[in-house]
Image: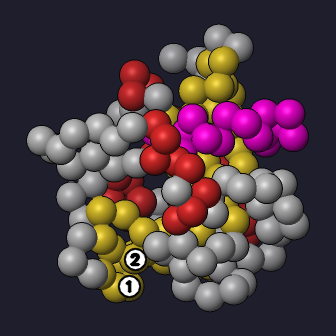
Amino acid sequence: MEYVIREIKPNEHNVLEDFLYEAIFVPEGAELPPKSITKQPELQIYISDFGKKDDNALVAEAEGKIIGVVWTRIMNDYGHIDDETPSFAISLYKEYRGLGIGTEMMRQMLELLKKKGYNKASLAVWQTNYAVKMYQSVGFEIIDKNEKEYIMICYLK
């Protein structure tokens, strides 16, 4: 499959809400939440007023359509480490998962953060999420965990 990874354009920030919904991990056997879940404050912090100084986003585009987004911002989210460390969010439409696109998006975002002078990046992920292995493959390591999630960090060398 041919695709390109590029920086998001300001007029495309509205796609973040769709991809925030796609990023919600639904454990096997659980019911899909309603799309309105993205309006909750604990999820709005990922996308509200996106485009500020520490906000970064890359999109994967295929056949003229955005099929995935990886974005970071410094926020007090589930994966928050400190006020200098951007937290990751990533998602692809289901039909594009498992093709290596997400891994390449993560690599390119880590490179972008490194160029911008960040020392590390963080994320939180459900322990049962298949993406844990992908995050480890691009350099993230588990530094903490709670009942359901791992807190992971990647040092940008």
Compared to 135, does 31 lie above or below?
above
Q: What's the residue at 29%, 81% (across, down)?
A: 145
How far, Cα to Cα, is label 1 from label 2? 6 Å
Q: Nearer the viewer, residue 11 or 4?
A: 11
Q: Residues within 10 Å of mark 1 (few under 14, many from 20)?
A: few
Q: Nearer the viewer, residue 10 or 111?
A: 10
Q: Nearer the viewer, residue 15 or 145?
A: 15
- Label placed on residue 42: none
Question: Which residue carries the number 2 mark?
Answer: 151
> Chief secondary structure of the magenta span?
helix
- Residue 139 in percent (x, y) is at 47, 67
Question: Which residue carries the number 1 mark?
Answer: 143
Identify the image quadrant of residue 136. bottom left
Disc 2 residue type (three-letter): Ile
Q: What's the residue at 46%, 47% (across, down)?
A: 37
- Total numbered badges shown on the rendered structure: 2
Whether residue 157 is visible to the viewer of this picture, yes or no, is no
